[in-house]
Amino acid sequence: MQKRRLSGRRPLLLAVGAGVTVAALAAGMTSAFAATVFSDDFTDGNTSGWSKSGGTWTVDGSGVLNQSNAGSELARQFAGQTSWTNYSVQARVRPTSFGSSSALVGLAARSTSSTKMYRLALLGSGRAELQAVNGSSVTAIGSASLGIGAGTWYNLRIETSGSTIRGFVNGTQIASGSNSLAGAGRIGLVTAYASGGFDDVVVDSSGGGTPTTPPPTTTPPPTTPPPAGWPTPTGSQKVDATIPVSGTFDGGLKRYYGIGDGGQSESQDPMFELAAGATLRNVIIGAPAGDGVHCEGNCTLINVWWEDVGEDAATFRGGTTYTVDGGGARSASDKVFQHNGSGTVYIKNFRVENAGKLYRACGNCSTSYQRHVVIDNVTVQNTDAIAGINTNWGDTARFSRITIVGDPDRETSICVKYKGVPKGSEPTEIGEGADGVNCLYSPSDITYQ
């Protein structure tokens, strides 16, 4: 399956923090906001900007970097700068095979050499372990039994701040400790006697300080903007009952309509119900649309358009990683995307018009998960707020390349903070705006037109 991402995107190395001078960066000055300093989603089909050490690495047709030699003792790809100190690195990681219970697929930070690093490892035993690795000496900083299995995507994140090292899996901290093995170093993707896939690598300053890297002397390559307008349907199909999807459903940009009453009444049936791992692509959802799309597990929505959002455009429920890539939604009196399950929602290359909120982490569901959203390259028009999260549960929202159209008074809220409550109560709004902890963006991430 070909994923629709930023066309020809190469690894991106950026200056850290809006308005920070070269001198300040060289002195290690920390920014008040998170700033993305490196990213790669491998849609350019290569590993330019990475250095290989062992293994057999290829980028497949869907833009995933794979290491396929499960017999390799140590296979690694490194990127970034050896001078990077305090930062956060995250990536989507999918083990595809384990040779033993101690085999691993994982993510590395502060790599000072090919054998010295901090490593967040998914083990064949089913555990996730944050490690300090110095050659053959491996010290466990902390671990958790998560039932790790081959074929499943996991969102891994390592945060480094001084001597404090933290590891997160699907947004949940599994380990934290103090260690002085390495104070600076590159990022890495690693396997040992295992094979796996890697995607959506992002490095930013949210780990407690900014990587001390000077700004680049060249302009980053252009990226694909969100689509400029709504597509013309190739046909229309009335739907009388929810369409179940497993695998991939490609609608060929046909309009589907006919579920529900077109309003905000609760418990309407969805137009599409996606099983775990399913992909919905090239679909226009007309009115009435009921409760839009339900994802019962990890799911991917590619080039999906909602002409008139009913109850919600999509609800993310049983998984840990959900991706919305391309498309758009309009006429949502409440929210567009409802996040009820755990994990992270990725929204990219998207348009939203005439809506209450683009994203809302559930504030009163029966289970109070920690939830995360990453919003990139999105155009917003006539919308009250872009994201709403529950800071008391540790939710985070990260924003980059947000364009807000037709808002001269800057009334659009970027990130609204709530206090989540048990089911049956109503969450209360407690603030808004960037804080470097839960709402992560800098002024340069927001453009007004």
Image: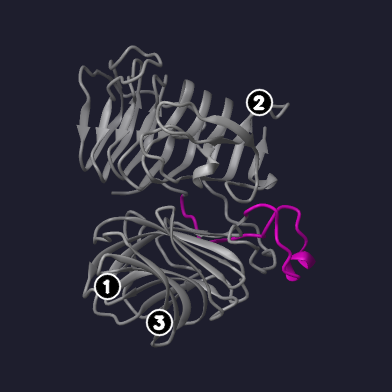
Query: Rounded to the nearest whole Å, what is the CA distance between mark 2 and mark 1?
Result: 51 Å
Question: What residue does disc 3 label?
Answer: 138
Question: What residue does disc 2 label?
Answer: 406
Q: Amino acid at mark 3?
A: Val
Which numbered disc, 3 or 2, marks the residue that appears first in the sequence?
3
| Residues packed near mark 1 inside 10 Å, few (<14), some (14 to 19) or many (20 plus) | many
Q: Give the magenta-colored segment's residue range.
A: 7-34
Q: Residue at x 35, y 26 (%)?
A: 284
- On the image, the x and y values in percent for residue 328 come to 45, 31
Nearer to us in this view, 281 or 232: 281
| Residues packed near mark 3 inside 10 Å, few (<14), some (14 to 19) or many (20 plus) | some
Question: What residue does disc 1 label?
Answer: 194
Q: Amino acid at mark 1?
A: Ala
Identify the element where label 2 is drawn: loop
Which numbered disc, 1 or 3, marks the residue that appears first in the sequence?
3
7 sits to left or right of 385: left
